[in-house]
Image (cartoon, helix red, strand yellow):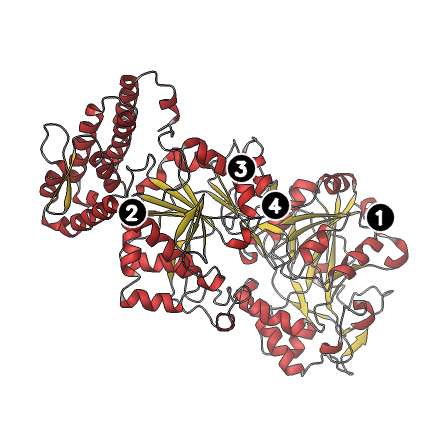
Amino acid sequence: MSPSGERGSLPFNRFVQQSHDAGEFANKLERLCLQLNGPEASWIAADILSRGAELLDRAGQDCTNLARLAESNLLAAVKTDAKSLEAPTLSSALNRLATLPGSRYWSNGRPIWTYGPSRSALAELRNSAGQMAEAAFIALERALVASQDGVTEHAPSFDTLVVLYSCRKYLEDRIPVLRETWIKELKARGIPYLVLVGDGDDTIDGDILALDVKDTYEALPDKTLAMIRWVYENTGYQFLYKIDDDCHLSVSEFFDTLTYRKFHYYGRSIYRTEGAMQRDWHQEKAAQLLAKNMLDRSPEPSRYCDGGAGYSLSRRAMQMVCEEAETDHGLFLRSVSFMEDKLVGDLLAKRGIAPANEDYLVHVYRKTHSDGSLVTKFDNGFETSLSTPTRVVHLDGSIGLAEANLAAQSASLRPRKIWPSCAPAQIGWNTHQLELLSGQSQLSRVADASHVLVAVLRSEMTMLPHFLAHYRALGIEAFIIADNLSTDGSREYLLSQEDVLLYSVDSEYKASHFGVAWQQAMLANHCVGKWVILADADEFFVFPDWQNRGLASFTRELDSKGFDCVGTWLIDMYPKGDLCKCDFKKKSPFDLARWHDDPPVQSTSGGGFYSNTKGGVNSTLRHRLSPEVDPTLFVANKYPLIRYSPWVRLSEGIHYVGNVSISPTYQTLCHFKYHAEFAEKIQREIRRKQHYGDAVEYRRYQQMLGEAQGSFYDPSKSVEFDVSRVYDFGLQGHPLKEGIPK
């Protein structure tokens, strides 16, 4: 049995390809190793030099000098630090040197190697290490014994095996695409690989390894352990690189840098704090009834490498996983785990091996629901290309595999992105990158528009048809929307709209100043000099005669008076009857939720950051239903209409604004938050904790809903909304309505 990949054809590094003879090749390796520094220099040098000696031997050339240099570096490493016995590449270097002619023999059932007249370097390593490293040395010897016993052919030309983690249903779908893309590069370099599936008999057919384990989602932990054990017991590979079949691997970035060889356990590191796991993730895809109704009960906190985006294990790590999996602790973990990658991390943690992610740049795509489109999530950067150091693109399915391969051969950056202009552009988690989903026609439409709307939203499918219809009727020519990982089809609906320029953003809402950072990115990149409405999906801007007059006429009047901003009262709208019967899927918000408190807002003290305004107002309704709360809560002044310029400063979710000239006549922003889906949204947002004060207002909403017993309508307080009325509410003397400096 042998993995796919031509033996002996791999160039050690690009410069080796340009060497004209063995002497030049050896000299280049020596010079390379002299440039290494740091505590790992000696054992990394030993790894490189032993690999060079092996290649020279396979080519029929004299490898004596390189082998002796490798030995001396091994000794130097251990003399410097006995912990070098635990270095991932130490057993690899020893294994290589043991296969050289005249160097390998056995003594007392243990492999001992020397080269030429030199004494046993293995014995000297042991003596140099001292008693403190005895356990590590014994473990190393066990690994070498397993390595030598398991290989029936000569040692592999490349000591890392790539395993593409798949299943039988994808053998005709994903695997053919991979064979025509990056698997070809593996073959060209002589890097061995296998495609792993279950429901087999532990045999290899071509490049398919079929293990005797179930090929189902709930069996993934057993399948992964079986894979590791098979590689450890049946091959001499010193490293195993496991990667899912929905990934694009940059072979050159991963293998040419050699970074993975520094670590026993290497990949995209994930840290799960207590309560952070989605313990039912497997249930939707599970085949067995028991698994469909069980939760993952593995321990938290936990740190492990993401299995989807690939991770490597040294031979020592493979050994530790196999041994720990059979202990009482390991058997317990296996009985409560459905996440195969987390199980590996938990087993290794018990043996003191932690994940490393140095230089492991990954771009991760995910579906936010089963029928959703792919968007960037978690590790946010760029796909593999000639311009990026990205190692892996994880696509969460077969869609996009061929496109990712084409992108890897170009110098362009994918996906296209924008950032807030008020901060340095960065990649990674929570860096407020907005990923462009729309095409060129939407970009052109925004460029030509004079009146646009900018919005940030998440899972607002019920409101979106009404929202778009209202603002189209008002005169908005183009919408620029940032979707924050919607799970209800909102993103897919917006992608189908010709006048919507859509971005996706995966950062946390609470880390974006509650959406202001994302609004600023869209404003700065698309809206300089334009009139812009900034509104949530449940906020509908109106002004006198708005149904007949149109937004362009309204803003011309503002221009003529020298104003570039309009303030509004945020009026909480609600139905006359029960909220649960107010279904916006059946009728429009203005038809079903026409009532509000009179007056809808009340004066409060204080002002916002970076603001031209003094004081503020808050919601009468919310304070009526929660009279004991902080009087500054439920702010109800907003500044949704501005002519944008780079010096405009928004803060606190556009409740305050700076560096503008505000019209003294405030307009109305109808707020349709309260309807049949309100209770469900409260629960969702309390769990997410992404709104102000870990969703303190949503906890107040929950209390309000209980106090109101399903209805906010009060005959003594509620009045019907009058679309023709200018809502001043007797606040003409309020600080918000006084002369406001520019």
Residue 81 drawn above or below residue 19: below
The residues bearing labels 3 and 4 have C-alpha atoms spaced at a distance of 25 Å
Q: Which residue is mark 2?
A: 315
The residues bearing labels 3 and 2 have C-alpha atoms spaced at a distance of 28 Å
Q: Could you tell me residue 83's position as x and y percent?
A: 19, 45
Give the mark, 2 or 4, whose residue is nearer the N terminus: 2
On the question of residue 453 being in view, the answer is yes
Other residues around mark 2 within 10 Å, as few (<14) / some (14–19) / many (≥20)? many
On the question of residue 39 being in view, the answer is no
Q: Which residue is mark 4?
A: 435
Q: Quadrant of residue 570?
A: bottom right
Q: Which residue is mark 1?
A: 552
- Going by the image, does 426 lie left or right of 631? left
> Element type at marker 1?
helix
Q: Which residue is mark 3?
A: 181
Give the mark, 3 or 4, whose residue is nearer the N terminus: 3
> Element type at marker 2?
helix
